[in-house]
Image (cartoon, grey):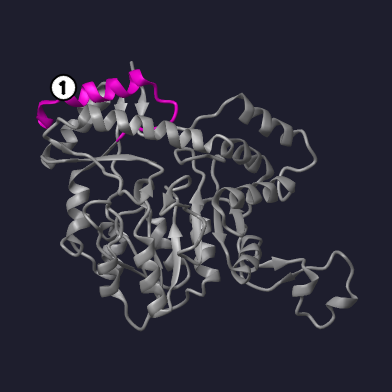
């Protein structure tokens, strides 16, 4: 029986060799591969600084912390995202505020962002949904006008481009975060990174990643630190253990060399889907704006007859095809309903999208036969005719 999931990592012999080499070395964590990986991410994206961490949720958390998000601050983000995009604000004592999405890209609507800004607003976290960059130019202009921080949630978008620049360059933002989870553009197993062009943020990110501790003598505040030996360190903030390992970064370095090929393979699969599914009247296909290059993390179709989604899911699963839904709107999660009083109808575009959404398989190691199998099974469903 087939087993075609919505996403899957690709690991080859070179990846395994790179990890094995580190496992046989003197360093397993906090060693040279971490900085080497960070430098490689900067070289790829064009950002000045990168801080690799244990996962993308940790990346979002410390990005909010160094951005000064605190008690009573509000941060605007999209309701169509993984819960971490909003939870990171709560971790800092702030309040996530949602702005509805645009119907075409499923990204946050800048016009809705404007409507949510008040004197408590501190930042905007645009999410590059499915790898398609949000409208960064307009979001950046809004942020500058209101003196707000912009943190790009680019967990889906490593390898994507916006107006000719790589996502992660931070031209339109203060920081951007990536995810290296197995289903993302590249993987380190678990892992993430925060990118920035601001040295002040970079230096704080390094400290918050490591328990709030620094061993940099130029940063010491203790009056007697100059008389101490090389063992001396200072905890200056309440930080976290968000460190990533050297063998994870070795895998990341090896994967990064294949990133452009991965993205190109995803784009070829998307082209097959666009051609093979375009004649089906029961679904709406995702689109790509002319000024962007999507990383195509996921391929989300929308069902016109959404009442049949459960039945369609089950039929595909019986055929060995494992779709997914990205995402249940965050404001409809029980925690957010109970804490903030959100209810159905608050964000109609997001809710309408969710009712119809279904992600079908998309990953670099899919064969043409796999893609055709998915297309043929969808075409054979009477619910989609």
The part of the image, by quadrant, that contains residue 375 is top left
Is 315 positioned to the left or the right of 33 in the image?
Answer: left
Residue 299 pos. (x, y %)? 31, 38
Residue bounds of the magenta highlight? 360-385
Residue 40 pos. (x, y %)? 63, 47
Please say if 80 is above or below 171: above
Is 236 positioned to the left or the right of 112 in the image?
Answer: right
Indicate whether residue 371 is drawn in magenta: yes
Quadrant for the N terminus in the image = top left
Residue 22 pos. (x, y %)? 72, 36
Q: Can residue 327 be seen in this view?
A: yes
Residue 83 pos. (x, y %)? 37, 56
- Total of numbered circles in the picture? 1
Residue sitting at x 40%, y 68%: 140
- Graded by Cα atoms within 10 Å as few (under 14), some (14 to 19) or many (20 or more), the crowding at tag 1 reads few
Please say if 155 is above or below 218: above
Is 244 positioned to the left or the right of 94 in the image?
Answer: right
Residue sitting at x 61%, y 31%: 15
Quadrant for the C terminus in the image = top left
Q: Can residue 7 be seen in this view?
A: no
The part of the image, by quadrant, that contains residue 141 is bottom left
Of residue 130 and residue 80, the one placed in the foreground of this image is 130
Residue behind mark 1: 380
Residue sitting at x 19%, y 63%: 343
Please say if 151 is above or below 19: below
Of residue 384 and residue 110, the one placed in the foreground of this image is 110
* Circle 1 SS class: loop
């Amino acid at each position: 029986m087939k087993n075609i999931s919505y996403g899957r990592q690709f690991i080859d012999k070179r990846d395994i060799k790179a990890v094995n080499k580190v496992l046989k070395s003197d360093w397993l964590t906090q060693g040279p591969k971490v900085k080497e990986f960070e430098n490689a991410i900067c070289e790829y994206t064009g950002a000045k600084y990168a801080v690799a961490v244990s996962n993308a949720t940790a990346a979002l958390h410390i990005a909010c912390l160094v951005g000064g998000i605190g008690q009573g601050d509000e941060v605007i983000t999209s309701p169509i995202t993984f819960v971490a995009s909003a939870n990171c604000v709560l971790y800092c004592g702030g309040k996530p505020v949602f702005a509805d999405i645009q119907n075409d890209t499923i990204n946050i609507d800048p016009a809705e962002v404007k409507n949510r800004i008040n004197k408590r607003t501190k930042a905007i976290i645009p999410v590059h949904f499915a790898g398609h960059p949000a409208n960064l130019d307009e979001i950046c202009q809004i942020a500058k006008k209101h003196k707000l921080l912009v943190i790009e949630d680019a967990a889906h978008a490593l390898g994507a481009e916006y107006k000719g620049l790589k996502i992660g360059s931070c031209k339109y933002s203060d920081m951007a975060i990536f995810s290296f989870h197995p289903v993302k553009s590249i993987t380190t197993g678990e892992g993430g990174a925060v990118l920035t062009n601001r040295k002040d943020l970079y230096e704080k990110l390094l400290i918050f990643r490591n328990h709030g501790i620094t061993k940099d003598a130029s940063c010491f505040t203790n009056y007697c630190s100059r008389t101490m030996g090389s063992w001396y360190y200072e905890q200056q903030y309440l930080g976290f253990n968000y460190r990533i390992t050297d063998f994870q970064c070795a895998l990341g370095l090896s994967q990064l060399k294949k990133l452009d090929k991965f993205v190109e393979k995803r784009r070829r699969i998307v082209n097959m889907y666009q051609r093979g599914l375009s004649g089906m009247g029961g679904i709406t296909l995702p689109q790509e704006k002319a000024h962007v290059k999507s990383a195509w993390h996921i391929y989300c179709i929308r069902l016109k007859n959404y009442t049949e989604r459960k039945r369609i899911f089950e039929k595909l699963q019986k055929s060995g095809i494992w779709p997914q839904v990205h995402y249940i709107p965050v404001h409809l999660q029980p925690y957010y309903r109970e804490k903030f009083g959100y209810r159905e109808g608050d964000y109609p575009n997001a809710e309408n999208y969710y009712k119809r959404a279904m992600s079908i398989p998309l990953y670099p190691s899919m064969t043409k036969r796999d893609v055709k199998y998915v297309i043929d099974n969808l075409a054979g469903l009477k619910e989609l005719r």
